[in-house]
Image (cartoon, helix red, strand yellow):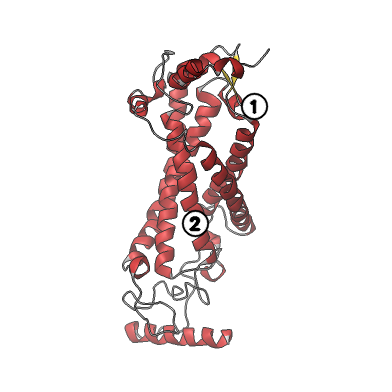
């Protein structure tokens, strides 16, 4: 039965192509040979014949004007997002000309900007003699449980974006497999992290002041910064990583399993890439802030400890809350 369907599909497409342009011989599948370095018929996501996205093997879809693209139906009407038209051209332009270019610009320009910041402003330094236990072991486990697969997802995602430039083949397929395995792990820990910190990451009025002074990172002076347990930049990263990461996991799953029609696949691919721009840029920012911008900051996400001076200056509102509530003394770590 599957073979019969496939033969009918080739007949329909061949007749359609012949009626529009005159008969041109056998169907050519080589036009899209650079997808992840393989022929389209062998592409990683296999957006080709005998799949839920059947109808793209000639570089177009069946002309059903917003109807189903299944070649064995009469093109019954579909509505909503699935019925949108015109995404074929938009997706092709974005995929072929802009997505890769934007990702390349992000991974080059964002690190260069932070390198310039490090050279001109330098690393913030604080007295770490007295330390406070700010994060629990559970906080640390959940954070790293989400962070490690998240970083793997980002790295392997970039490898797939530049798959053709990296030669395609087994290496890109391995990246795809790691990408797929890491995603559900991130989803589990991402949900735990969201539940654990979302109250702390709700934006407050004082976060506007943090943005106005860019968290004090454009100055060498250690002055009080209006911030709670998480500053406004960390809060922004939290929402992009959790909600944005969740959307990317969903859209990635739709593309991987192809549980929809070709037009919806194009839409979710666009959404996946656009959110990916923000995720990659903010991930680089988060890594820079954790490893280079503040001396000893990495310790907070390794053992949960922060220097009291650092906390009192960079998270002044949270520090004041600890003092007023009497919790500060119990958080001090004995030498």
Residue at the right extreme?
335
Residue 77 as seen in the image, left or right of residue 177 = left
Residue in view at x 61 percent, y 17 percent: 330
Residue 248 as seen in the image, left or right of residue 178 = left
Residue in view at x 35 percent, y 28 percent: 211
Q: Which residue is mark 1?
A: 303
Residue 320 as seen in the image, left or right of residue 297 = left
Residue 216 higher or lower than 94, as above or below:
above
Residue in front for this viewpoint, 29 or 161: 161
Residue in view at x 54 percent, y 71 percent: 41
Residue 198 higher or lower than 171, as above or below:
above
The answer to whether the residue labelled 1 contacts the one labelled 2, judged by CB atoms less than 8 Å apart, is no
Q: In the image, residue 23 lies at what x, y percent?
A: 39, 86
Residue in front for this viewpoint, 204 or 260: 204
Residue 157 higher or lower than 138, as above or below:
below
Q: Which residue is mark 2?
A: 250
Residue 123 appears in the figure: no
What kind of element bears circle 1?
loop
Q: In the image, residue 257 lies at what x, y percent?
A: 54, 65
Residue 19 appears in the figure: yes
Residue in front for this viewpoint, 127 or 332: 332
């Amino acid at each position: 039965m599957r073979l019969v369907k496939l033969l009918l599909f080739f007949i329909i497409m061949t007749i359609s192509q012949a009626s529009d342009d005159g008969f041109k011989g056998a169907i050519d599948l080589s036009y899209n040979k650079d997808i992840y370095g393989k022929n389209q018929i062998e592409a990683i996501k296999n957006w080709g014949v005998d799949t839920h996205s059947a109808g793209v093997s000639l570089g177009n879809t069946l002309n059903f004007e917003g109807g189903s693209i299944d070649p064995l139906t009469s093109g019954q009407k579909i509505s909503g997002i699935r019925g949108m038209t015109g995404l074929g051209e938009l997706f092709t332009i974005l995929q072929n000309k802009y997505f890769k270019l934007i990702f390349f610009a992000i991974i080059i320009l964002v690190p260069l900007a932070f390198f310039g910041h490090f050279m001109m402003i330098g690393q913030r330094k604080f007295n770490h003699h007295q330390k406070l236990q700010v994060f629990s072991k559970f906080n640390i486990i959940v954070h790293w449980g989400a962070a490690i697969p998240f970083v793997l997802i980002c790295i392997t995602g970039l490898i797939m974006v530049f798959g053709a430039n990296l030669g395609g083949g087994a290496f890109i397929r391995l990246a795809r497999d790691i990408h797929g395995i890491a995603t559900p792990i991130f989803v589990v820990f991402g949900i735990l992290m969201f539940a654990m910190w979302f109250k702390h990451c709700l934006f407050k009025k004082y976060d506007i002041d943090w943005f106005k002074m860019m968290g004090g990172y454009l100055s060498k002076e250690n002055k009080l910064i209006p911030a709670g347990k998480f500053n406004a930049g960390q809060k922004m990263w939290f929402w992009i990583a959790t909600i944005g990461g969740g959307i990317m996991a969903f859209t990635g799953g739709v593309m991987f399993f192809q549980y929809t029609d070709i037009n919806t696949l194009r839409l979710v691919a666009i959404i996946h890439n656009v959110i990916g721009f923000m995720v990659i840029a903010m991930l680089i920012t988060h890594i820079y802030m954790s490893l280079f911008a503040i001396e000893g900051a990495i310790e907070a996400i390794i053992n949960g400890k922060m220097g009291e001076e650092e906390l009192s200056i960079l998270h002044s509102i949270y520090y004041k809350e600890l003092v007023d509530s009497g919790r500060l003394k119990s958080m001090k770590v004995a030498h």
